[in-house]
């Protein structure tokens, strides 16, 4: 297929010397799958998502029968099922190049975007069932956005929010494309609204999707244009009022980094954490912390042996530390790394890819509810079509939420394993009414009197605690 025009790929340098990371007894890396193009190839910014059934869902940029990308399901043992092959409709009206991956919504379906294709060729928003039935909800026209690269998020209001790299009403100099990108919202039925159009190249072009902060506002990043990456951190209200919080490359020599391609994370301390793909002290990108008010601290500058050019965001795992991937570099390798970093900025490289087990992890990692991490690489494996991997750090099982906030009386979904026979569910110590739907999924009602806190689920094999607090909305 024709490769996307932006953002440009970071080239992986082929080196002759490859190494295997030495793992401690509690650290086990496994290559679960090596794509062969017929089943998909080159998963890009897409992180995996855990479904109600306990399996993982994702997308590939290329490959499949039509060579235009796929949506897939994969088990923890590496058994892959191709759910959908894009460009299955005439002139690709169903979309092509699903860069961003999928999210699990409260209705049990998965939602995502394609970066190209659709009625106007500018990409789509789609819904897909866990069995593979796809519905196109919106085709971007250009003026309302074009080429979404970031994953969607489902807001408190049940609508979906996302970004496009191009499009909108901004007057930008970007090689004939209209606009510097947009922020949009769309309902599960396809009712679409453009919330914001970025107006300047250097401050526009969001690659990452949004997150919803505990204050109800959305937070995100822009990468800037291709000729001079810079970028911003911003927040935007659900009504579309945007505030820039920080401009990158504002320090001497761009020591603060530039081009934040990855999604932000709001950690347990209330601050936001992310990565920049370029610059920093050594030129290989950074990990940063930023307060809701816009005060930025560079926690780590990559220096090549510990990785470089991170294009994905971070997650906070059940041990309280942050986990992420670096797209390239690494000790005696140029194929990327998996790392962990404390909130104070101490970074440890957990795995260095050697190309046979993967290369260029453009997407982030997911911690499944068994405690194990899962992710993908863009290159590597058989014929460089990319891989799916797992990394077991010995962390304990837990439960997680389909959506991590709600009002008293609202129903919410809880993911886990071994849930059949559950005897109690509580939110911050307050018992909740619940219904076990399967061994990997239950629903609970936010109980009266509950306040923000962790959810505990008592199962026959023990008590499971949520990986983060559930926020009770007043």
Image: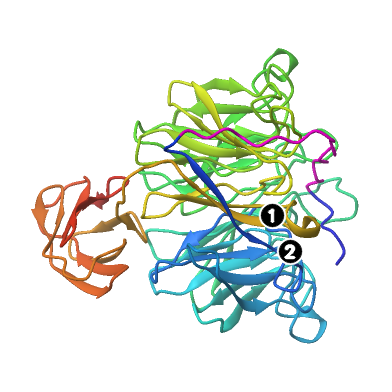
Q: Position of residue 62 (x, y in %)?
A: 76, 65
Closest to the observer: 444 or 132? 132
Q: In this picture, is 250 found above or below 1? A: above
How many numbered discs? 2
Along the horizontal axis of the image, is 452 left or right of 145?
A: left
Closest to the observer: 220 or 357? 357
Along the horizontal axis of the image, is 210 left or right of 453?
A: right
Name the residue at 10% across, 58% down.
Answer: 448
Binning the other alpha carbons within 10 Å of mark 1 as few (below 14), some (14 to 19) or many (20 upward) gives many
Prevailing SS of the magenta stretch: loop
Which residue in the rendered view is the most extreme toward the top?
Answer: 252
Along the horizontal axis of the image, is 34 left or right of 420?
A: right
Name the residue at 53% across, 26% down.
Answer: 348
Q: In this picture, is 72 found above or below 452? A: below
Element class at badge 1:
loop
What residue is pinned by disc 2?
41
Residue 21 magenta: yes
Which span is picked out in magenta?
Answer: 7-24
Q: Which mark is residue 44?
A: 1
Q: Position of residue 377 (x, y in %)?
A: 67, 51
Q: Position of residue 311 (x, y in %)?
A: 66, 41
């Amino acid at each position: 297929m024709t490769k996307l025009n932006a953002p440009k790929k970071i080239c992986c340098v082929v080196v002759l010397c490859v190494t295997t990371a030495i793992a401690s007894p509690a650290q086990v890396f496994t290559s679960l799958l090596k794509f062969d193009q017929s089943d998909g190839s080159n998963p890009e910014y897409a992180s995996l998502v855990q479904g109600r059934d306990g399996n993982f869902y994702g997308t590939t940029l290329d490959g499949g029968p039509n060579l235009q990308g796929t949506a897939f399901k994969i088990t923890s043992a590496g058994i892959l099922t191709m759910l959908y092959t894009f460009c299955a409709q005439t002139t690709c009206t169903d979309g092509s190049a699903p860069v961003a991956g999928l999210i699990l919504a409260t209705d049990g379906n998965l939602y995502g975007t394609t970066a190209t294709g659709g009625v106007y060729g500018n990409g789509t928003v789609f819904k897909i069932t866990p069995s593979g039935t796809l519905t196109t909800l919106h085709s971007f026209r250009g003026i309302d956005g074009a080429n979404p690269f970031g994953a969607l998020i489902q807001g408190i209001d049940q609508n979906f929010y996302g970004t496009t790299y191009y499009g909108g009403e901004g007057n930008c100099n970007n090689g004939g494309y209209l606009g510097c990108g947009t922020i949009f919202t769309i309902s599960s039925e396809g009712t679409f609204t453009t919330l914001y159009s970025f107006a300047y190249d250097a401050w526009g072009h969001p690659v990452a999707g949004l997150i919803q902060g505990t204050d109800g506002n959305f937070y995100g990043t822009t990468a800037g244009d291709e000729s001079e990456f810079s970028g911003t951190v911003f927040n935007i209200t659900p009504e579309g009022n945007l505030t820039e919080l920080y401009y990158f490359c504002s320090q001497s020599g761009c020591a603060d980094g530039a081009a934040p391609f990855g999604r932000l994370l709001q950690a347990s301390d209330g601050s936001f954490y992310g990565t920049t793909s370029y610059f920093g002290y050594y030129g290989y990108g950074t990990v940063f912390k930023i307060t809701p008010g816009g005060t930025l601290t560079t926690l780590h500058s990559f220096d090549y042996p510990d990785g470089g050019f991170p294009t994905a965001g971070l997650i906070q795992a059940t041990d309280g530390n942050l986990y992420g991937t670096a797209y390239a570099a690494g000790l005696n390798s140029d194929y990327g790394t998996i790392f962990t970093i404390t909130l104070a900025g101490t970074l440890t490289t957990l795995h260095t890819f050697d190309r046979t087990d993967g290369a260029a992890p453009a997407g982030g990692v997911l911690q499944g509810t068994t405690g194990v991490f899962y992710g993908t690489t863009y290159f590597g494996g058989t014929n460089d079509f990319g891989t799916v991997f797992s990394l077991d750090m010995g962390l304990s099982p837990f439960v997680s939420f389909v959506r991590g906030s709600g009002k008293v009386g609202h129903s919410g979904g809880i993911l886990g394993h071994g849930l059949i026979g559950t005897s109690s569910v509580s939110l911050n110590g307050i018992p909740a009414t619940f219904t076990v739907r399967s061994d990997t999924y239950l629903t609970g009602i936010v109980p009266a009197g509950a306040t923000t806190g962790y959810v505990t689920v008592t199962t026959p094999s023990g008590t499971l605690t949520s990986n983060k607090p559930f926020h009770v909305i007043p």
